[in-house]
Amino acid sequence: MSSTRHSDGVLTDQSRQLSLLVNSITDYAIYMLDPTGVIRTWNPGGQRIKGYSAADVVNTHFSRFYLPEEAAAGLPQRNLKVAAEEGRYIGEGWRLRQDGSVFRASIVIDPVWDNGQLVGFAKITRDITELYHAQEQLLQAQRDLLQAQKMEAIGKFTLGLAHDFNNLLTIISNCLDMIGAQVKEQPVSSLLATAQRAGDRGALLTRQLLTFGRGQTLVPESVDLATMLGDCEAMLRRSAGDGITLSIELPPGLPRLSVDKAQLEAAILNLVSNSRDALPRGGDIAITASARQARDPAHSERGLSGHVCITVADNGEGIPVDVQARVFEPFFTTKSVGKGSGLGLSQVFGFTSQSGGFTELESEVGKGTRVRLCFPLEEH
């Protein structure tokens, strides 16, 4: 009976009720600030989220929780000003814990008035780090899916176009061969030879389009990457040209790949050629590889699996962020007219995708570009 009377007495005292409520909440940091931002109260939620005890923070300025550059820029004072002038401040940002780590905070600041006089602020902070990262991952997955769907649509269109183009080229090439067999006089034979070279170039472009559209027939075989790169190293160095240092560094014991060897060589050659073009004043190109667990961005539901990833990196001009999403599209090129067909990277993308892998690109203007080809491990 006495316990019931004690409980009733406590619950009829409003200030005691409020104190019990605030101090019972541990998922939110709830505390009072004076008009200048000095902390006057502190609850257990503040200690759980930020790591400080009441003795650590009471009578100190709340700007201590902000990142140093934000505190120096006056962000804490601006947030209080917004709360006072607009009736509330709502926002989120990165904040500091006592141990120096950061967390993503959802923040609400309400002004406290007494007879028209601003006497302080009520501040509520919630740790939303996990939610923030989950939303970022979801947005990235959505961007990856949209990009994969776009590339698939372009691939289907390209595949149909390439087949029709290939049929026309076959007819033209056959007719040129028949005419060439009967006409030997100059300058007609010279003109025929020029036309045949143009037809061969068109056939090469068609094969690149078919590769992008995944319509090229691949002949996979078991490939030892170190041996393959050793065999074509001289060709890669010639492609890199003078003034450029090409290095090939592979860790020992890389798993074998089941890929079309000729297409893989062509893909790496395309990447080296692109890096060379991004180094007009010379520089470095590095070919590396690693075995790792990776997830295909277009098929994230499949989870992590074993891949061998080949990286071609340069320290060249880099690619602007606004065009990076388009570099694998056929005919898209950042080079000047006559300097490229825009099919090199599309061949790389199509071959890697058709081989069951995926392509990654990282680039920063002025710092260089890295293109990574990730192939699934050979099944035994």
Image: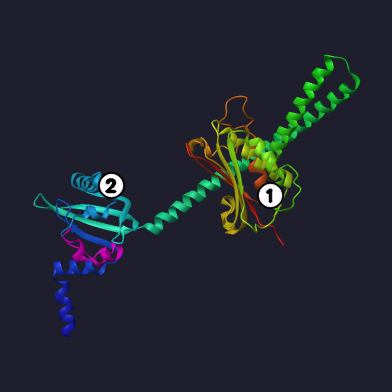
Callout 2 touching callout 1 (CB < 8 Å): no
Image quadrant of residue 176?
Answer: top right
Check the image and report above or below for 291 versus 361. below
Residue 10, image x, y percentages: 15, 74
Q: Residues within 10 Å of mark 2 (few under 14, many from 20)?
A: some
Residue at image coords 18%, 81%: 4
The foreground one among 200 and 252 is 252
Question: On residue 70, which mark appears?
Answer: 2
Q: Secondary structure at mark 2?
A: helix
The foreground one among 225 and 42 is 225
Residue 363, image x, y percentages: 51, 41
Residue at image coords 43%, 53%: 135
Cα gap from disc 2 to disc 1, whole angstroms: 48 Å
Region of the chain picked out in magenta, as a range: 39-58
Image quadrant of residue 344?
Answer: top right
The foreground one among 281 and 274 is 281
Question: On residue 29, which mark appears?
Answer: none
Residue type at the position of mark 2: Glu
Question: On residue 355, which mark appears?
Answer: 1
Residue 104, image x, y percentages: 35, 55
Q: Residues within 10 Å of mark 1 (few under 14, many from 20)?
A: many
Q: How is the image coloured?
A: rainbow
Q: Secondary structure at mark 1?
A: loop
Image quadrant of residue 292?
Answer: bottom right
2 or 1: tag closer to the N-terminus: 2
Indicate left or right for 106 with 110 as reference: right
Question: Which image quarter holds the N terminus?
Answer: bottom left
Indicate left or right for 89 with 242 as reference: left
Residue 347, image x, y percentages: 66, 39
Residue 343 falls within the magenta-colored stretch: no
